[in-house]
Amino acid sequence: MKNIIYTFIVILLCSTLQSCIYEYNEKPSETRIGHEIASEAVRHICTTAKLTELARIVDLWQCAETNEEKYAIEDFYFEVAKIRQLSEDTVKVGILYKINTFGKPLHDTPWQMLPANSEYGENAIYEVRFVDKGLYQVELIENNNESTVLHTVNIVEENKQYCVESVAKSVPTNRLCFHNQLDYNTALPLTIKTHQSSPVPLWQPYYEITDGQLEINVYTNGTPMKQDETHVTFNWSRAKINFRDNSDYYTGLDWYTILF
């Protein structure tokens, strides 16, 4: 009788372990790779596009007539970072960004911005240009990786809504396992909205991409991975990922804390 009980227990344990192993090794959806690729592109777009807002605020700060006005601008737009004039031509924001203003307002000349500690390279220099009221361009003008990046940012409503068009080539990746470079372009402009009842700047974490389409190509050691081309369609809080003839809906592509 004991042997029968022991045999039954062994069979039960084997069955349970096999079930656990099967569930653990269950193949995930292929679109999860597309989700990782899309997240990398979105992170890069938002991190770079925020330089427009950064330049706009520093321009307000420089044009302020009194120290009290300057302090008020710092307190409203930055929780911890401070704006400091390093020289006639150079302004520092927090511990990461230095801006070469060439001693002129942004409306008069393009500024050069150096994200010295950016995850996308210490040697990257971006140029921010004022185009028209609420319309700016951000372009990568110098980088060791021979990347090209151009964003056109329309500030629809300050601290609330932005419209971004982007084209980028040969952008190094940081968080992808199988690809070390990507290209992307906005097939339809991305609408970015803040996600709080009170206005917050673009670099705050409470925002989402509510509309637009993004096309992404990826490379592995310089070789284009055609089968891994990723297409993203944004619809409010959801993003439809098309990857390897599969499509799924995801959330969480746009909830990134953008630090300065």
Image: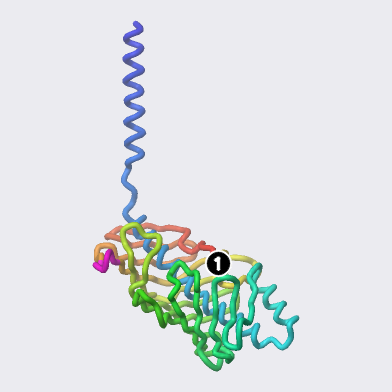
From which residue to which does the magenta span run? 219-224
Q: Is residue 249 visible?
A: yes
Magenta span contains residue 248: no
At x 55%, y 85%, the residue is 134
In percent of width and height, residue 190 lies at 45, 73
Q: Answer left or right for 145 relative to 211.
A: left
Magenta span contains residue 221: yes
Q: Answer left or right for 241 relative to 237.
A: left
Q: What residue is disc 1 on? A: 259
Q: Identify whether 155 is placed above or below 34.
A: below
| Quadrant location of the C terminus in the rendered image | bottom right
* Amino acid type at image mark 1: Leu
At x 35%, y 23%, the residue is 13
In percent of width and height, residue 73 lies at 68, 78
Magenta stretch, main secondary structure, is strand
Q: Can you name the residue that lies furthest to the front here? A: 87
Q: Nearer the viewer, residue 37 or 165?
A: 37
Q: Is residue 156 visible?
A: no
In percent of width and height, residue 236 lies at 49, 65
